[in-house]
Amino acid sequence: MNKAIETINNPRKQLLKIVEDLSLEQLNKIPAGFNNNIIWNMGHLIAAQQGICYKRCGLELRIEEAFFMKYKPDTKPEGFVNQDEVDEIKTLLFSTLQQFDIDVNDQIFTAYPNFTTRYGVELSSIADAIHFLPMHEGLHIGAIIALKKLVIGH
């Protein structure tokens, strides 16, 4: 696996350990003062990577469009996520990165348009996108850790 993609994959493995003891209710709970929950943040990691890497290049997403629309930036949880959906998210966290690694090696990301993220980071190539993703992932994993403390009452 590409070293930069590994930098995304390994924290996702730790993320599964962080949430492994949480119930469906805890994964879905939106604490006071927040507009999302743990499972939305996990789904968002997948959708954001797909959008930044595939959609920006005009390529077909490696996830269902409905999944992307549910978890893309500027969305929020719209209902209870059941166990099947949680299991799908946990699988997609890794299967999408494995496919991404293959696609990067196959050099399918040939036309990456310049884009400035909401964090002020300019991306002008797939390499830039790959280097941006760990920062984005870290923000959301940090949010998940904070949300976990609130949903378990610590």
Image (tube, rainbow, N blue to C red):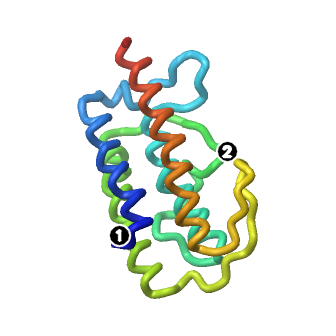
Rendered image quadrant of residue 34: top right
Note whether residue 5 is visible.
yes
Residue 153 image position (x, y, % from top left): 37, 12
Residue 36 image position (x, y, % from top left): 55, 32
> Disc 1 or 2, which lies upstream in sequence?
2
Residue lying farthest top? 153
The kind of residue on which mark 1 rests is: Gln
Q: Is residue 67 above or below residue 41?
A: below
Q: Residue at x 75, y 59 (%)?
A: 116
Numbered disc in front, either 1 or 2? 1
Residue 45 image position (x, y, % from top left): 49, 51
* Tally of numbered tags: 2
Q: Is residue 43 above or below residue 128?
A: above
Q: Residue at x 50, y 54 (%)?
A: 134
Horizontal side, residue 144 vs residue 6: left or right: right
Rendered image quadrant of residue 2: bottom left
Q: CA distance from mark 1 to mark 2?
A: 26 Å
Residue 147 image position (x, y, % from top left): 46, 26
Horizontal side, residue 61 vs residue 57: left or right: left
Q: Quadrant of the N terminus?
A: bottom left
**Dot 1: what SS?**
helix
Q: Residue at x 46, y 65 (%)?
A: 63
Q: Residue at x 42, y 30 (%)?
A: 145
| Residue named by callout 1 | 98
Q: Quadrant of the C terminus?
A: top left
Q: Is residue 66 above or below residue 40?
A: below
Horizontal side, residue 147 vs residue 15: left or right: right
| Residue named by callout 2 | 74
Q: Dots 1 and 2: beta carbons under 8 Å?
A: no
Rendered image quadrant of residue 7: bottom left
Q: Characterize the local packing of mark 1: few (<14), some (14-19) or many (20 or more) Cα atoms within 10 angstroms.
A: some
Note whether residue 96 is visible.
no
